Each structure stands twice: as structure tokens, then as C-alpha cells.
Image: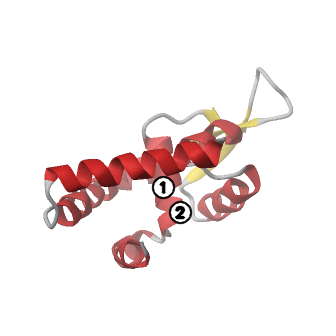
Amino acid sequence: MRKVYEHYESRLSPFGLTTPQFMVFGALWSGDGITIGELGERVALDGSTITGILDRMEKNGYVERRPNSEDRRSALVYLTDKAKQVGPQINKFADELDASLRKNFSTQDMAVFERVLRDLGETRAK
């Protein structure tokens, strides 16, 4: 896992993103305008961890928090125009990385790996 993180970090450095920020970026890319709680569920991180990641991403101009008109106690998280401009490049990188990691393993091995990760995630949620 450390090797994968290192590979991500080296490829994400031109964008000023860390691997956890990349995970948050990807979750928001699939649909932003969500609460921090919803975002935490998407990336399986707790609220305080997400808040720290969002603080750094906001400082770097990738996300913004807006008041939630339905619940004054919470904010909604959105990608900025800057994030939307670099999003296709970041997604292309993610696809390339995914393909390069998968090429060394059989389809069956990847299916087992993905199932184990899914099971670990479900165990963590319980």
C-alpha cells in the first residue's frame, strides 16, 4: 500500500494534492454539493479527518464550503472552477495508474483483491 501511495504522491505533486486529497477529489468529482458527513461516508474517513483535508484543499483553491440552506448547522462542499479545470487531467492520471497496477495481476486476482477491500470497508463501517 505504501508503494501505491508513493506512486500517487509523485504523480499528484504537480497538482499540489496528496493521496487522501485525491480520494476526496474523486468523491466530489462524482457529485459535489454534499455535506462533510456524506463525503466522509464516500471515502470512509471520519469527520475530523475530512475537515483537515478540506481545509488544505480549500487553501489550495480546489474546494469551497457553502452554507446548507436546508440545515444551517452544516455546509455543503463543492469543487471550484480550478478543480474542474484540472479534473480531466487528474482523472486521466487515475485511469493510467489503475491500468498500470492491474496489468501485473490476473482478472481473478483483482476480483479477490477488490472483494477483500470491500469486506474490510464493510467491517470498518460496523
Which quadrant does the N terminus fall into? bottom left
Query: Residue at 25% of width from left, 63% of height from top?
Result: 97
Asked if residue 79 shows in the view, the reply is no
Q: Position of residue 86 (x, y in %)?
A: 36, 56
Which quadrant does the C terminus fall into? top right
In the depicted structure, whether residue 58 falls above or below residue 36: below
34 relative position to 97: left or right:
right
Asked if residue 58 shows in the view, the reply is yes
Name the residue nearer the viewer: 11 or 117. 117
Describe the element under mark 1 as helix, strand or loop: helix
Query: Residue at 48% of width from left, 71% of height from top?
Result: 16
Query: Residue at 51% of width from left, 51% of height from top?
Result: 120
Q: Position of residue 29 (x, y in %)?
A: 44, 42
The amino acid type, in three-letter code, at marker 1 is Met
The amino acid type, in three-letter code, at marker 2 is Pro
Q: Position of residue 35 (x, y in %)?
A: 68, 36
The residue indicated by pointer 2 is 20
120 relative position to 40: left or right:
left
**Residues marked 1 and 2 touching at CB (< 8 Å):** yes
Query: Residue at 34% of width from left, 49% of height from top?
Result: 114
Near mark 2 (Cα within 10 A), the count class, few <14, some 14-19 or many ≥20, is some
Residue 59 position by quadrant: bottom right
The residue indicated by pointer 1 is 23
